[in-house]
Amino acid sequence: MAERLEDELCCPTCLNIFKDPVMLKCSHSFCRACVKQWWKHKQGLSCPVCRKSCLPMDVSSNLTLKNVCETFTKTSLESETMCSLHKEKKKLFCLDHQLCVCLICRDTQIHIGHKFCSLDEIAQEQKEKFENPLQKVKEKLAEFTEIRNNCSEQAEYIKVQRDLVESNIKKNFEELRHFLQIEEQAKLSALKEEEQKKSQMMKEKIETLSRDMATLSDLIRTTEKWVTSNHVSFMNNYQIAMTAIQELPDKPVLPPGALLDEVKHLGNLKFTVWERMKEMVSYSPVLLDPNTASAHFSLSEDLTSVSLNVEKQRPMNPERYQSWNRVLGSALDPGKHIWDVEVGDNADWLLGVVWGDSCLPHSSFVWGIRFNNNKYQIWSLPYPSKNLTVNVKVQRVRVHIDTNTRSLSFSDSHTNTELYTRSNIPNWPNLSGKRTMYPYFYTNDKDPLKIIPLTLCVMTQIHK
């Protein structure tokens, strides 16, 4: 660079100064790339040396400096090919000193007894030795380029995944909020209904009591009037007055259950709402991993269904199947696992488990049941397949695996008919090590394979 800049600008010996030198309005010169880098880093337009503000239109090519640099470069190359002592062109190569020399140098005292060869011949010979190593470097560069491009592709796909997952999260929470709003309205409506019902009952009770009280008040006033009247009038109405004052209504009682039932409305409110929530939520014992799905697969939003579809853009990450139409489920922990898969009218499928290196889960052993060409087979790659005799077309397959007993079984869950069972399977993985076991799904049919959710049950338990 023409001026020595701070380290944050760029390398002070930037070679771009020879190719594309530019001059700012303040007369300082730099390479164009370094100026752009400086402006981007500082987020402002100024000269890296004097800090004077400038505009992109103030940047002009420094043709004078460019010509000087080109002349200097040409002169340097020419001086390199000339002998500095004899001003002759270098045509020989001294094998003893490993130096390029001219014809006069060969006959000097310093090179007596040395072996020489043509500079052109040895240069061509040495250049040929670089062909294979250089080709390997190019191949290595191609490998790095491929991986970098794939990383860039994955970086872009991460954003796509983020948008998709974010949308699904919002959708699920919106459904939960909608459910809670409905439950809230139902609870409030029940509360309001009871309040109106019991308020009306109390209103009617109060009105009845008010009428009875008015009747008694009238009786009291009439009787008091009779008692204070003359004796003849009193005795003439005695029997009627005595009968009226003796036939009194029974003592009123407060109606039971008149108040609101707070226990019904508030008791274990969150629990009862949560218990009702099981009607709208589902739990799948196995979830499909989109990062392993082949490009020809389409997965449902809840990751429980897979079908053959048009090819989708998916990055070539290490976990993804590049051949066949396969997808893995979530990794299995040690213990027992059961899941049902609805195969329906799908005419080409394979269900089971696979185990191998956790970074390459599809690289090793597969055990599964296969349906193709109206025939059922047990696949145990890398071992030969085995034909099964099944009298009825299976609509739903149950996979049952027990890692403790190293056993695997397949059955028709509709009819509870066993299709195949195998114990003590060879090469069984140690799930505590690097080897991991995954549910395995393959299909070459547009009809989906769907994992059946489990029936949810809410239970309470007393801890002693």
Image: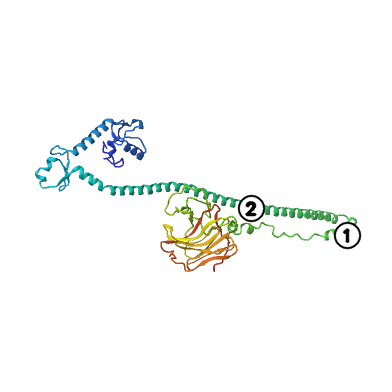
Q: For the point 75% across and 53% down, which residue is it?
A: 207
Q: For the point 19% across and 37% down, which residue is it?
A: 79
404 or 236, nearer to the observer: 404
Q: Which quarter of the figure has residue 49? A: top left
- Tell me residue 196's x, y (percent): 69, 52
The CA span between labels 1 and 2 is 60 Å
Q: For the point 20% across and 44% down, which residue is it?
A: 121
240 or 189, nearer to the observer: 189
Q: For the point 19% across and 39% down, which residue is it?
A: 81
- Tell me residue 144's x, y (percent): 35, 48
**Element on which disc 2 rests:** helix
426 or 73, nearer to the observer: 426
Vertical arrangement, residue 255 with respect to residue 121, above or below: below
Vertical arrangement, residue 138 with respect to residue 375, above or below: above
Q: Which amino acid does label 2 sit on?
A: Ala
Q: Can residue 340 be seen in this view?
A: no
Q: Which quarter of the figure has residue 375? A: bottom right
Q: Mark 1 points at which residue?
A: 239
144 or 167, nearer to the observer: 144
* Label 1 or label 2, whichever comes before in sequence order: 2
Mark 1–mark 2 CB contact (< 8 Å): no
User: Marks 1 and 2: which is nearer the front?
Assistant: 2
**Element on which disc 1 rests:** helix
Q: Which amino acid does label 1 sit on?
A: Gln
Task: Name the quarter where the C terminus is drawn.
Answer: bottom right
Q: Mark 2 points at which residue?
A: 186
User: Does residue 185 appear left or right of residue 88 in this picture?
Assistant: right
- All told, the count of numbered labels is 2
